Amino acid sequence: MLLAIRLKALLKTCVLFINNLPRKHFFALILLFVFLLIISFIPSQKLRKKTIERQLVLPPMSTTAENYAIAEPIAAVKEVYSEVFPDFSGNREVQIEIKTGDTLSEIFQQEGLSAALLQELLEEDKQYLRLSNLLPGQKVKLLINPENKLLVLKVVIDLANTLTFTLKDDQYISLLEIKKGEWRNSVFQGSVTGSFYLDAKQAGLSAGQIQQISGALQDKFDFNRQFRLGDTFHILVSKQYIDGEYSFDSEVLAILIKTRLKNYSAFLYEDGRYYDQNGLGLNKAYRRSPLIKRYRISSPFNLRRLHPITKRISPHNGTDFAAPTGTKVYSIGDGIVVRAGYHPAAGNYIVIKHGRKYTSRYLHLSKIYVHKGQRVTMDTLIAKTGNTGRSTGAHLHYELHVYDRPVDAMKARLPLSKEVPRKQIKTFMQRRDLFLKEMGETSI
């Protein structure tokens, strides 16, 4: 009873309080009451654990075995996803494909590399003679550190040759990598209908190979006058392939020309010279020196020589003759000019290839009388001595390379005789018979 009286009194007090409120406060209280009433009717929700599912997509190079992914080496993944694994070393890589007119000097200037650095590299390149005359299609790669110092220079010369200069102990070390590739033999044959040159081209022989054929038999057979309608030629050629692609390096291994009166043959031996079926030389032998007279050797072949200009230990891959400017220089043997031009360190120079085995080089010349692609004999005047390039005086720098390695030309074994030596005649005959068999011939 007492509780009811108290509640009635409290309600009366509240009504009296509300009636005495200002109009604005009254309406605010009503809105608050309505809002609380609405909130009370909204059902409460319990938080549930949700599993977020995402499809895992493996990289394209990843493979699977059964139901498990096979992990790949991090290096392999880095090559494909370089943006995921950036190079934090700070070194800068530059790759350029040479176009007509491009020079290494211009490339260095564009990359902010000094002319003094280029001269240092050219001096090191003197043993290769490749940097001064870059050809269209060749590729140049440079690795430069954050201080703009050249760490590596790589020149992809062709399919078979890559030249690299690497900075080591503040000195550039050069390395010429040579891919040996695969040599494959092919037989070309045809009948003479008019011009031997045109008929040989029709059979698939190149201009260089035809020149090599005529050069091998030039003292035995007149290609312009002795051929008659119906005469046949049979040629065995070896071509070099690098990674399955023809490198355009080839050699004529055997020649057989059949006429109505007589057959003529030539076989290339290991010394780079041609001999007939009996082992008699068809070309003149090599000479020991490219000069007619004897001149003092001012600097011999020396792989540990102290360079007279740079004062560093630098191999001297050739023999220097103290010949005055203008002295006549002759090819040491039959061959083809593969390079002739100017190099800032070597001056005017000539490189002659004598078959697959021998190569000769002539540096610091005053005049050059031959051109690239020209076939020469031992009697050919190719140049005159001089003092061009980085040189301390007039002289001839002469080099001899055997299978692309420099040797002492004054001591190396050279085929100086006019026939196959008796100790090697059996080997020559076996080689001859093998060539004939490949050509489908049993006898000459």
Image: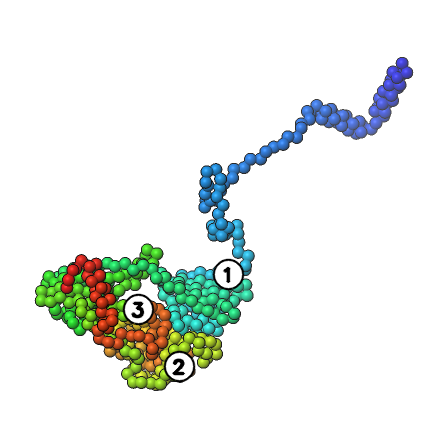
For the point 45% across and 80% down, the residue is 308
The amino acid pointed to by label 3 is: Lys
Residue 316: image location, x then y, percent: 41, 76
For the point 33% across and 85% down, the residue is 295
Numbered circle sitting on residue 92: 1
Whether residue 193 is visible here, answered yes or no, is yes
User: In the image, 271: left or right of 4?
Assistant: left
| The N terminus sits in image quarter | top right
For the point 49% across and 67% down, the residue is 167
- Helix, strand or loop status at disc 2: strand
For the point 24% across and 73% down, the residue is 421
- Circles 1, 3 touching at the beta carbon (< 8 Å): no
Question: Which scheme is used to colour this image of the protein?
Answer: rainbow
Residue 57: image location, x then y, percent: 49, 40
Residue 197: image location, x then y, percent: 18, 65
| The C terminus sits in image quarter | bottom left
- Circles 2, 3 touching at the beta carbon (< 8 Å): no
Numbered circle sitting on residue 299: 2
User: In the image, 39: left or right of 315?
Assistant: right
Along the viewing direction, whichever of 363 and 291 lies nearer the viewer: 291
- Helix, strand or loop status at disc 1: strand
Along the viewing direction, whichever of 65 and 167 lies nearer the viewer: 65
**Structural crowding at the residue carrying mark 3, measured as other residues with C-alpha within 10 Å and reported as few (<14), some (14–19) or many (≥20):** some
Q: Could you give the CA–CA distance between mark 1 and mark 3, rounded to whole angstroms?
A: 40 Å
Residue 417: image location, x then y, percent: 24, 76
Lower sequence index among marks 1 and 3 = 1
Along the viewing direction, whichever of 425 and 361 lies nearer the viewer: 425
Q: Which residue is mark 3?
A: 357
